[in-house]
Image (cartoon, grey):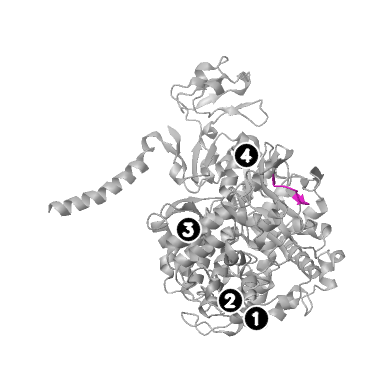
Amino acid sequence: MIKGGFKGKLLRVNLTTKEVKSEALNEEWAKKYLGGRGYGTRLMLEEIDPKVDPLSEENKVIFATGPLDGTLAPSSGRTMVITKGPLNGAIASSNAGGHFGPALKHAGYDMIVVEGKSSEPVYIWINKGKVEIRFAREIWGKLADESDELIREQTHPLAETMTIGPAGEKLSRISSVMFNGHRASGRTGVGAAVGSKNLKGIAVRGNEDTTVADPEAFMKAVYKARDILSKDAFAGQGAAMLGTAMLVNVINGVGGLPTNNAQDAFFPEANKISGETLRENHLIRNEGCAECPIACGRVTVVKSGPYKGNIGGGPEYESIWSFGAMCGVSDLDAVISANHLCDKYGIDTISLGSTIACAMELYEKGYMPKEDAPFELRFGSGEAMLKAVELACKQEGDFGKLLAQGSYRFAEHYGHPELSMSAKKQEFPAYDPRAIKGMGLEYATSNRGACHVRGYGTAVEVLGDADQYAYEGKAALIKTLQDLTAALDSSGICLFTTFGLSANELAEMVSTATGFPIDAQEFMKIGERIWNIEKIFNLKAGFTRQDDTLPPRILSEPIKTGPSKGHVEELGKMLDEYYQLRGWDKNSVPTDEKLKELEVQILK
Amino acid sequence: MRVLMLDQAKCTGCRACEYACSFEHTGKFNPLDSRIKVNEFWEDLTFVPSVCLQCERAYCEEVCPTSALTKNPETGVVELEKEKCIGCKQCIVACPWGSIKLDHTGKEVIKCDNCGGDPACIKVCYPDALSYEEVEDITNVKVLETATRLKEIAKDLVKGGA
């Protein structure tokens, strides 16, 4: 019996047959994997062949909440999109803030499983448990925020929406899914998975309560967690004041900001694109996702110059880096405009900025014929960067189309895949592994491809006490953080809460919400279990140990300038130890003993 | 006497106030049962909280046929006596702000009661968009903000005149 946290129901929508049905949640899975990423991955393992083409009818897309969505738990507005990732074919889950997740719970469902493929564009309208599949012919082709507005006009002004932009429609492998028109599930190309189903959006509205198993104990845990967060230096103060962009000066200050396609890791002009500058010149207000006391979200505007009037959400730290330092660009107006454009077209800012940086290097080195680029593609040119963003968003010309497939495919096309700063074909974000050693291990072993939110080692290695250059202890640290974030991603709250909260507080909220006997140890075990079933999915999809690696540049080219000058990443110093700690063999395959211990041996 | 004060410029649109309010009154989470509402204008990314203003001349009180609504002269709160309410919804029609409403079942009239003097919404509003202040103090912050700007001008003026 579900006592609380979960609604206990999932909605299955088949776009081929137009069949809609409501199903009981599998309680054993809810106990073992919680919701979100964990439950979604378990369902994918059960229901699809990991070898299927991510853009085929056989792939499924799951929109999942966790047991804390729709409650007062801090930052509990996450919606997880789980699918086989279009960017690299690995198990993908990409989450966003906003208010869609809580609304889905109020509508009576923990998750939506979208199957099949519609013969023409549609959107799904879920209103108080009633579900309609509606034609979206007139909305197809519209920008993500325009689509949000149109769908709300046609459904309910207070509906919460998921929409894709033109990038997802045109199957860009770095396209995102947008919530409320401006919150992105950015990574792994989930937008293309949605687009391949001819699904333009989902609108949700409901009137049901969300309840928890032990209200009194739950609220005690919630207020305790909120209090801890409000006192935390990052979550309570830094992020509220400067947004995630506060990290620009911090990470550059330790020599870990990848610059000019990671030819260096120090950007002398970092202050021009910093959180401080953003606050001073562009910030209109802070924005918080559902129930969030941190409110790291920014609303910004360009006040003068050629991009004057450009207004929107963000940019986050990662986007500032990818369009800024990674492209050598110090023009914050251009960076902000690029970010806003990406949100409208529904394309991942981390991957696109990094792909443009990769193109710039290919161009400057002469690996890419000059005539293939519609203009001079030089590092440092904000104008060139922004023009490239526009072409990629619109997928105009061969150049734009190629950019929209990500840096790996772009670089491979010109015979130099090694210049793609990616792992498992996904571009890594704004922390240089040569300077922050654990991040390299995190990127290399991340099940969905290079990623900073599958552990967030930076929180300990730079903002915390660990030595950023040390290898010792990093395998254990990254494993612990990976397990923690896997469980957290399945509970429905935001990664940033881990700046203040430990497994204790998280387990307290999850157990009082669900009534499941989950303490900190069990919470971590749930995370480890999720990590292992993701790995099993990938092994079945054809990934091997050879895929757990980093670009050769990171492993062999020392950082040229700045505080981390001379460093390379020696991944080998951590990888074997990591597999050992995970209970995996040398080929990165989980041992039978480990799977038995985690009670998932049947899945191998 | 203390009143609820709203500051739209500080609201981040997180809606924690709605959840705190609904839990305080029902023990469950449901924004439809919240007495406070955060209005969102996504096209401008602007958020405007609204709540019962406890009007001095309260139309809801005037129109109520059973005197279920009465203004408490001491606290200034227009109080709703559930037992007397017949659910005629005249108060909802009369309220110019939409601040008195039906709960999610559509059967019960609900309105802000300042949680009896300890508003739950305030406790979760980290950006201080909501505050519960003495009447004498309600515009202090705004006055000070304006004065601070004027101070800079005044300083410049002195320089110019010297």
In this view, the mark in front (3 or 2): 3
Can you identify the residue that label 3 sits on? A337
Span colored in magenta: A113-122
The residue tagged 2 is A433
The chain holding disc 2 is: A
Q: Position of residue A181 (x, y in %)?
A: 57, 49
Q: Are marks 1 and 2 in contact (CB under 8 Å)?
A: yes
Q: Residue at x 45, y 66 (%)?
A: A382
Q: Are marks 4 and 1 in contact (CB under 8 Å)?
A: no
Secondary element under disc 3, as helix, strand or loop, is helix
- Check residue A429 for magenta coloring: no
Label 4 to label 3: alpha-carbon separation: 41 Å
Q: Residue furthest left?
A: B162
Q: Looking at the image, tell me whether mark 1 or mark 2 is earlier in sequence order.
A: 2
In the rendered image, residues at marks 4 and 3 fall on the same chain: no
Decide whether residue A119 is among the magenta residues.
Answer: yes
Identified by mark 2, the residue type is Pro
Residue A469 appears in which quarter of the rendering? Answer: bottom right
Tell me the tag on residue B23. Answer: 4
